[in-house]
Image: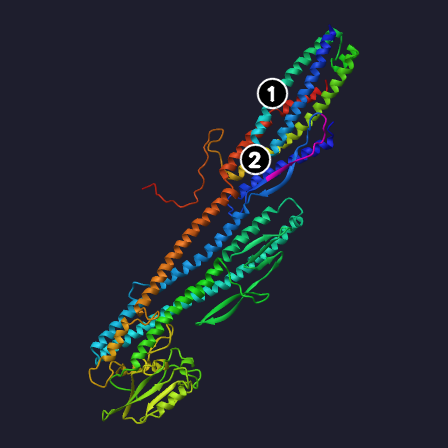
Amino acid sequence: MVSLFGSLNVGEQALRASSVALQTVGQNIANASNETFHRQRVFMDALPALDKVTYQLGSGVDVERVERVVDMALENLIREAKSELGSLEVMRDTLTRLETVLNEFTDSDLSTSMADFWEAVDDFSNNVESSSARRSVILAAESLSQSFAYFSGRILEARSEANDYVKQAVGDINRIAREIADLNKQVSLAEDGGLQPQEANDLRDRRDALVEELSKLIRVKTTESSTGMLQVYTGSEFLVFDTNVYDLTTVDSTDDGVVVSKVVFEKNGMELKPQGGELKGYIDARDTLLGGYSDSLDELAGTMIYEVNRIHSSGRGIEGYAEIAGTYSVSDVTAALNAAGLPFDVENGSFTVNVRNVNTGHEEGTPVKVDMTGTGSNTTLAALVASLDGIDGISANITGDNRIHIQTDDSGTEVTFSNDTSGVLAALGVASFFTGSGASDMAVSSVVENNLNLLAGAKSPSAGDNSNALEWLSLRDSKVLSNDTETMDDYYTGLVGTIATESASYQDRVDNQTVLTDQMVNERQAISGVNLDEEALNLVQYQQAFQAAARFLSVISEMMDVMMSI
Amino acid sequence: MHKNAVGKLTVLLVEERETLDALAEKASEKQRAVVELRTADVERYSAEEGSLTRKLSALEETRVALFHESADRLGIEGEVNVESIAIAAGEPYATSLREAKTRIAVAAARLKKINEINRALLAQSLGHVHGILGLISRGGEEPTYRAEGVGKKAPTRTVSLVIDRRV
């Protein structure tokens, strides 16, 4: 006969199992709108029969475990997809911002400034004696310099912001890693170090959600230990191992005036090079994308400065110089000029120093050789200054900050330069038009700005000579960039075009990756998500079935009372 | 002739016991189906339980008729039950009747226990289901019409009007 204890036991188990099953339904429904929740299902286990008289009555079932409905392979794919998306979105956003900054097709864009500058030079070449034409060249050049400086500044700002995001991402990664490590401890405790068949579903859901959040920041992979702890690593380095967290930190350095933070592991200082996620996006945007465009802008500005200066320094204005100082300093006055830290190269060649008596008009030209053959004694600043100092009518010396300084020996003479095949005058900033070496510091020489007569439109003292202005203008169509394959205009057009193309390309990639990610998330939703309509329908069916099942209970009870007393 | 009625009663009691065991089995299977939320099985077992209950009821009516017939034939006065019939009928019927009665009592007790568990289980399950249904329906929602036919009040508007119907 079934014992009272046995019956009570079966009843208790049935009630408990039923309660767990329905509570699980309730929990699924309560979390229907929780994106990170995984639907749970109950696995029942048949209990051994309590008695084996005629039938195995009362054997019943009990809850073996409540399991999350989760496809870990799909979860990993979603993490990968979100990492990639995070990185692409940062690059897309950066390019979009860059496009806005370049502000093409408006009056204030750089190409308009360049066109205005060439137009002013063109006008100058036709009116070489005109002071208004000279003033126009100065104004257009100032506007061009400001445009370069503006765009360079915006790119530097964007780089600086990207660096701030790098630091922020590192902080977020450390925070999430700590939370995962903490959950590792909780999961392991809840599952008794992996000995319990029942998994800590809600803790695991929270941990998975954190790993997904982490994946958006940095591409990570995970493995689970037998104790239920998750090991999280990026590349071959662990971020989380059991309950230990390997913090990241940043080490600052400066690049082009921008603080650049390198991401390293705090424990050993090893640099982290993320393979995906927003952190990779921010680092790539800062260094490769923005750094690359900043370099390109500097290349364009530097070429403009050097090429204009090279022509300007070999020409002459309405008057020559009584005193002149180079704008660039060398690091070592005894070092060969092409290895002395000048912003521009010096080639093997020569130039002519013209000393002119303004009263008599007599002019004496003295060639100066610049030896950059790489053999023997190459020209140093000290040697060049000595050569110049030896020329009658002028004196030369080196300033305290290692710049060249030349002046005429008496007030009735002036000095000009011509036929510089070495580029040394432009490299030292002698008789230059522009100062600076890149987009950020490009400016019009204050010497020329303050004395328009020094603007060099001629190559000879003859009145009306516009040959230097024409050579200057010819620079517009000269292929001086990209290994002499592109003009400055071509280069800039290419730069803007590349940004637009890359921006469109990244937008496409973001769109495609978004579709891919959404598909996978939808697939996960189909597997792990909760369909409220379906759950509601099930509940109504449970209700009907249970009500039907309760129908004969009273009748049977009454009948059994009778039958036990026959 | 009395032997014929007592023999029939013995056979009937065996059939009643078998029906009780079958009913207990169904009740047990239904219990498992309820726990595992297998609604189709719950409904199927409930229907089968209904058939067996009706059969048991019919057997009971027959048993009552046989009790009366046996009492008349055996001249039993006062309360008629299996024990009084067994005493009156004597051996070899008495032993069979007493054994059948004992087995029925055991089967009935078992079924009663399972039935009590199922009663508690279904009450609890329905409570859960109603609770969850309340979770997914809008909390505190009044029915559209009350039993007395009074309409519910319109809920307080919490969003601003987009269309001004007075225009």
* Mark in the foreground, 1 or 2: 1
From the viewer's side, name the closer residue of A525 and A561: A525
Q: Tell me the kind of residue under disc 2.
A: Val
Coloring scheme used: rainbow
From the viewer's side, name the closer residue of A536 and A365: A365
The residue pinned by badge 1 equals B51
Using the rendered view, name the quadrant where residue A338 is placed.
Answer: bottom left
| Identity of the residue furthest to the front in this view | A375
Q: Secondary structure at mark 1?
A: helix
- Residue A384 coordinates in the image, percent (x, y): 38, 87
The residue pinned by badge 2 equals B129
- Residue A542 coordinates in the image, percent (x, y): 56, 32
| Location of the N terminus of chain A (image quadrant) | top right
- The vertical placement of A544 against A207, above or below, is above
Left or right of A109 on screen, residue A337: right
Total marks shown come to: 2
- Residue A378 coordinates in the image, percent (x, y): 40, 85
Q: Tell me the kind of residue under disc 1.
A: Ser
Using the rendered view, name the quadrant where residue A156 is placed.
Answer: bottom left
| Location of the C terminus of chain A (image quadrant) | top right
Q: Chain of mark 2?
A: B
Magenta highlight on residue A48:
yes
